[in-house]
Amino acid sequence: MNLVTLSLGSNIDPEKHIRLCLDALAETFGELQISRIFESEPVGFKDSRNFYNLVVAFHSNWSVARLQAWAKALEMAHGRTPDMVKCSPRALDIDLLTVGDACGVIDDVALPRAEITQNAFVLQPLAELLPDERHPRCHTPYATLWQRFTLGRQRLWAIDFQWQGRFVSQADPLPRKVHAR
């Protein structure tokens, strides 16, 4: 069984689509580890609504191809089409971040996903969820990668979020200003 990590995002009715995605993940893969959910300003999008982003981890023996096909089918069930413009609003975006220690292009999927070290909306939830897990390529713990990360213009903040009648995410009690490092 491999530890699988996924990045989830939505900026079209995000509460609804994130909940439906978590339902589908739990139904398919069982017990989930779920990061806090962050609202973030869109990166690379023009005139777009804020995103909800989170990371989910679970164990699976599925192949990379099967995991990717499942994720893309769920995205399409939520209105995504193969011809969508890259930086357009979306009900659901599911990206396969890691599958165990896999490195390289496997079943046409680049692992680990480059966005782990490039985007705060991926790295912060991943570092909070799995701080001691190591990035498969550089072998640095995610918490260390987050400590070294330069935010630049990326802004995100944790939000309150309930799923299946319980809080899976809570906002910071006192808002913190985000400073570029």
Image (spheres, rainbow, N blue to C red):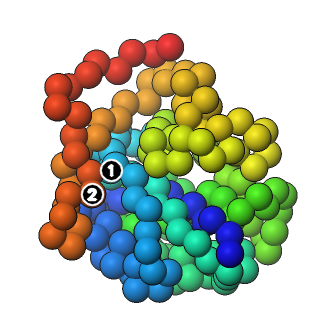
Question: On the image, numbered disc 2 is attached to which residue?
Answer: 168
Residue name at image x 62 percent, y 77 percent: 60
- Foreground disc of the pair 1, 2: 2
- Callout 2: 10 Å neighbours few (<14), some, many (20+)? some
Lateral position of residue 65 relative to residue 55, left or right: right
Quick check: 106 above or below 173? below
Quick check: 111 above or below 121? below
Three-letter code for the amino acid on which mark 2 is drawn: Val
Residue 161 position by quadrant: bottom left
The reply to whether discs 1 and 2 touch (Cβ–Cβ < 8 Å) is: yes
Name which of mark 1 and mark 2 comes first in the sequence: 1
Q: Is mark 2 on a helix, strand or loop?
A: strand
Position in image of residue 27 (x %, y %): 40, 85
Position in image of residue 8 (x %, y %): 44, 60
Q: Can residue 82 be seen in this view?
A: no
Question: On the image, numbered disc 1 is attached to which residue?
Answer: 37
- For this rendering, which residue is in front, 139 or 114? 139
Lateral position of residue 100 relative to residue 41, left or right: right
Q: What is the CA distance from the residue labelled 1 to the residue labelled 2?
A: 8 Å
Residue name at image x 81 percent, y 56 percent: 103
Q: Is residue 112 visible?
A: yes
Three-letter code for the amino acid on which mark 1 is drawn: Ile
Position in image of residue 20 (x %, y %): 30, 76
Residue name at image x 45 percent, y 80 percent: 30
Lateral position of residue 7 relative to residue 104, left or right: left
* Numbered marks: total: 2
Residue 112 position by quadrant: bottom right
Name the disc covering residue 4, or none: none
Quarter of the rendering occupied by the N terminus: bottom right
Quick check: 51 above or below 43? below
- Callout 1: 10 Å neighbours few (<14), some, many (20+)? many
Quick check: 177 above or below 101? above
